[in-house]
Amino acid sequence: MMNINKVIEPIEISNIVIPNRIVFPAFQTNFATPDGFVTERLTRMYEKISKGGSGLIITGCIAVSDDGVPNTNCLRITKDEHIGPLSEFFSSIKQHGAVPAVQLIHAGRQTLSVMTGHPIVAPSPIPCPVMNETPKELDEARIKRIQDDFVNAAVRVKKAGAELIELHGAFGYLIGAFLSPYSNKRADKYGKDKTLFFTEIIERVKKNVGNTPVCCRISADEFVEGGLTLNETREFAPKLVKAGADVISVAAGTYASMNHMAPSEDMGEGVHMNLAEGIRSVVDVPVICVGNIRTLEYANRIIAENKADLVAIGRPQLADPDFFNKSINKQQISECNYCGTCLFFTIGADSIACPQNPEL
Ligand SMILES: Cc1cc2nc3c(=O)[nH]c(=O)nc-3n(C[C@H](O)[C@H](O)[C@H](O)COP(=O)(O)O)c2cc1C
């Protein structure tokens, strides 16, 4: 008999109640228009996922600056015109009972100027070994401009109806690049205190969005030589909470360790649970875990054993948007077989696709 008593318990975070512990994490589909607007296809995809029963749906990523888009057709929240279509998008998610949330991103050096139409930027002029384009080092004025972009984006997504705002500090994108000694070689205050770029954003976002909860996603281990490991991230995670983080989402990897961003099947179920547990033991806010979590029963065990407070399930919900409800009702699921087709940018495709879910 499948035990799912824990995973169906609601959880209160700041001013919201998430009806259960399952999260659909941020997933860059490349289904938006080239100028970052929501499309029918994107709405259809998220509507199906929200009907499927997950309590928290983190849409996006959504780029806060035009020079920070990770791909050509990523959602953007760079002007007021983006708000209207997004508010319809969020209400269609909400009408099925899920909490509509959003992830804000600046891609930093993990993009290309041919995709953004702008020079790419980073804490230090070191190219990402995968993208191979040397970024411009940000000066303090440009740092301030991008921090403003995060704040303006947060205000806009709140206006559009997002009820939780996730700041993307994972995977080596701009915030993650500042956090890491692997990519941040600065001698100024943003290099001496590598969390400063992020904590300033968190503090300012919190000041501007009232009691809307803010989640910080981090790579608790970057799995690259000279990069962040759990020792360092355990040290700085409490600083993010002090700055105002209401939730910490624990992921792993960078573009140079892509096999940890979206772990392959052979890495085993719950491959990064030790990281979530490690961070959870040093913070006093809820923690989201992720990575090869394939069944609701396994997710339930994670909650029951106090290893995390919420469980993100990505690819399995892409393969079957009804994953949660079908699991509860003991119906057959269309299972993700970790074929890698959804990782469109690694196989030269234009956008995500899934052989298990051809209607995507
Ligand atoms: C195609 C694809 C796109 C993704 N896009 C994002 C993203 O925009 N932001 C993010 O934080 N994580 C992103 N991720 C990572 C997922 O949120 C999740 O952490 C990862 O898929 C591991 O979870 P899973 O094993 O349940 O799929 C993406 C993953 C894939 C496969």
Image: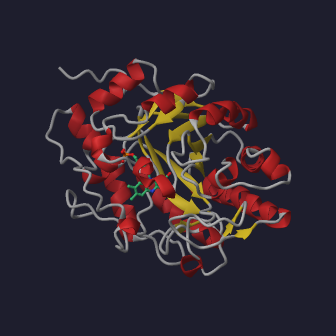
Q: Is residue 280 above or below residue 352?
A: above
The N terminus sits in image quarter: top left
Question: In the depicted view, which residue is nearer to us: 69 or 83?
Answer: 69
Q: Which residue: 34% across, 73% down?
A: 349
What percent of the width, then of the height, locates residue 17?
51, 32
Tell me where residue 82 sits by quadrant. bottom right
What percent of the width, then of the height, locates residue 110?
56, 64
The C terminus sits in image quarter: bottom left
Question: 7 left or right of 211?
Answer: left
Question: In the depicted view, which residue is nearer to us: 188 or 4?
Answer: 188
Q: Which residue: 68% across, 47% down?
A: 179
Question: In the depicted view, which residue is nearer to us: 254 or 40?
Answer: 254
Q: Which residue: 69% across, 58% down?
A: 150
Tell me where residue 141 sits by quadrant. bottom right
Q: Is residue 329 above or below residue 334?
A: above
What percent of the width, then of the height, locates residue 237?
65, 34
Question: In the depicted view, which residue is nearer to us: 62 or 336?
Answer: 336
- Residue 59 visible in the current orientation: no
What percent of the width, then of the height, locates residue 67?
64, 72
